Image (tube, rainbow, N blue to C red):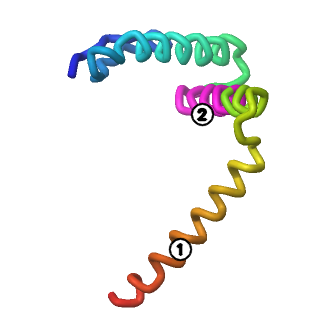
Amino acid sequence: MIHVDVTIMGQPYKLACKADEERALREAANLLDKKMSAIRDAGKIKGNDRIAVMAALGMAAEFLASKSASGGPSMLEVQEKLGAMHKVLDNALTPQENLF
């Protein structure tokens, strides 16, 4: 593992990653910095936590849209799969909860 120093919205962070993942981590941090800075500079949202959530939602929507356009699952399909997984987990965990 190596340590990588990045800056997001003027705040320094020291992150750990594998040596072969450094470039991807730096690119991801740079993208996040740009998204968060743009939201902050628009002046409509205050607070770094809210800015981070809005940036994450925007990036997630972009990711899902690109997956859908490239033949990946649609957002509805992802939601349906998540719902099915929740049901399976609930059914599997309920008997264990009754033991205690």
On-image quarter of the C terminus: bottom left
Residue at figure coordinates x 55%, y 13% from the top left:
31
Q: Please count the marks in the image.
A: 2
Disc 2 versus disc 1: distance between alpha carbons?
Answer: 28 Å
- Which quarter of the picture shows residue 54? top right
Q: Position of residue 65 (x, y in %)?
A: 75, 30
Q: Which residue is mark 2?
A: 53
Front in this rendered view, residue 15 or 96: 96
Q: Is residue 7 left or right of residue 77?
A: left
Q: Which residue is mark 1?
A: 90
Q: Position of residue 96 (x, y in %)?
A: 39, 82
Please tell me the numbered disc located at residue 18.
none
Query: Is residue 44 covered in magenta?
Result: no
- Which quarter of the picture shows residue 45? top right
Q: Residues within 10 Å of mark 2 (few under 14, many from 20)?
A: few
Q: Magenta residues: mostly which secondary structure?
A: helix
In the rendered structure, which segment of residues is drawn in magenta? 47-62
Front in this rendered view, residue 61 or 69: 69
